[in-house]
Image (cartoon, rainbow, N blue to C red):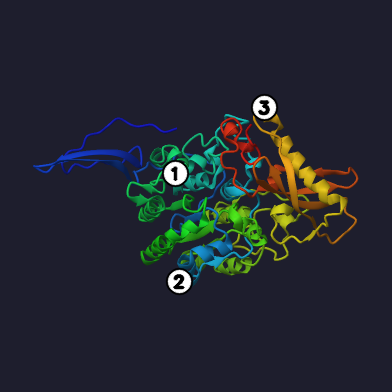
Amino acid sequence: MMKFGLPSKVFGSGVYELVTSDQVEVNCTGYDGTTPSHWFGYKVGFRSIPKPTRTLVTPKPRPQSDPINVLIIAIDSASHNGFIRRMPKSHEVITKELKAVVLNKYNVVGDGTAAALFPLLSGKTSFEHEDYRKALSTTRLDEKLLVFHVASTLGYRTLYFESMPWIGTFQNRHNGFSHQPTDHYLLPLLMLQSDAGRKWWNGDKGRYCIGDTAQYALMFNLTRQFYNIKGKRFSFTFIADISHDDFNVVTTADEELVGLLRSLKVGGKLEDTVLIVMGDHGTRYKSTRDTYQGKLEEQLPFMAIRLPLKLVNSRPDALKALEDNANVLTTPFDIHTTLLDVLGADESRNRFTVKGSDLPRGMSLLKPIPPQRSCGEAGVVPYWCACASWRVVPAHAPQYTRAAHALLQYINNVTSTKRSLCRVRKLTYIEWVMQKISSSERQSSDYYQAKIVTSPGYAVYEGAMRYLKEEDRYLISVNDISRITEYGHEPDCVWVVAPHLGNFCYCK
């Protein structure tokens, strides 16, 4: 919820102090003796905030003399290889100048941004929390679920910026937060400036800018300013507008990111700050995703971590463990556990263990992770596991058409509750079906993947399913399905009442 405060007048060289908000609407008038002038716009800064009063039961803070700050910069749709291709200067600085450790086997655990950031920021998937989806509940997200709250209770000043908030991680299919999740939050300004997203959808030429400044440049600049503030700091800056629809556009921010990273290093801000530069997932649409390379890139986002000298000196084994873990399967669950480790709040970590595993699902990257760790142990289902082995099912095999039709039937079942609005999808053709290669042929179930093209429209879906042999049926979860073509205006009729059907509904 956004609201304006009472207007305040400032004359001449007077100063307006940010007290209740970081963002103000400014309406200036002046007169130079001959010509009247007028300017309207917005100004953004950092207000003074009182000492945090929120409480959490368990975290045990580090000694105040040894705080470690956290700075996370995320770019939407930045795969491991895509970042190297489109942000070459930044990659050079990150790996050569800053000597950050790049995780080569960092794997997503689900479809889209929410499936990446819920585990990273909360230690759980969105499905493991209370159901906050718009169509099923009016409940708003409890901001205490996120790592920002843990940091705040330990005396950190917190920041969360995300561009395109009208389809943001916690707003697109969810109801947003019950309270502002961090001390500094850019959502009100971005919603106002974009006219709640309408400028974007209407193709407004100024959609990438706030005034005469690129939106990403403003966010980088504010992030830089944030690390000039005294005290402990924890920030997450997520750039989406220049990469969400077309990752090629992200190149425009390459030099700006280089400038931000170098200025932080030269200014000594990284001496006591863990730096993470990351993507949430790879490109999910466009022609690139329709290739085997694109499929792998969606599953393998960019993730680079640089430890400050202060942490390395106090924990000599941490850097060695991080470097060793660069070639071990890792996930967003591990990043969450690592952040809590850095904050000294291990007591707040999620201790969930996948059934049949001896390893916790989320493990700190600053401690050894077994190199033989499997996708199952790490909480990655077969469809999203980049290292799983699959074999092609021939078109004449019975499971070829059965698996494809099972996927189609599931998609239509998902939209059946809104059948008065959504048309039934029909199978146009089957592109391929694959079976997971197993070391044992005597299992009670097999895993299959299918890629199908459906009508009306041209909707391409990939999905994984478990075939239960004794019951002769398929088991499918919505978390195991990915739509790899953009849906555009197809689901407009359900966007308000059932946004979780966006990937599946074709409105009548």
Amino acid found under the numbered disc labelled 1? Gly
- Residue 250 location (% of width, % of height): 47, 57
Q: Tell me the residue that label 2 is attached to.
A: 97
Considering every residue shown, the one lying at the far left of the view is 33
**Compared to 23, does 252 lie above or below?**
below
Dot 3: element: loop
Q: Earlier in the sequence, mark 3 or mark 1?
A: 1
Residue at image point 33% right, 31% down: 5
Q: Can residue 306 be seen in this view?
A: no
Label 1 packing within 10 angstroms: few (<14), some (14-19), many (20+): few
Which residue is more in the foreground, 324 or 300?
300
- Residue 404 location (% of width, % of height): 78, 47
| Separation of residues labelled 3 and 1 (CA atoms) | 31 Å
Amino acid found under the numbered disc labelled 2? Glu
498 relative to 438 in the view: left or right: left
Residue at image point 45% right, 47% down: 161
Q: Which of marks 1 and 2 is nearer the N terminus?
A: 2
- Residue 342 location (% of width, % of height): 53, 57
Q: Tell me the residue that label 1 is attached to.
A: 203
471 relative to 68 in the view: left or right: right
| Separation of residues labelled 1 and 2 (CA atoms) | 39 Å
Q: Tell me the residue that label 3 is attached to.
A: 420
Which residue is more in the foreground, 330 or 231?
330
Instruction: Find residue 362 and report its image quarter.
Output: bottom right
**Compared to 122, does 294 lie above or below?**
below
Dot 2: element: helix
| Separation of residues labelled 3 and 2 (CA atoms) | 58 Å
- Residue 436 location (% of width, % of height): 79, 57
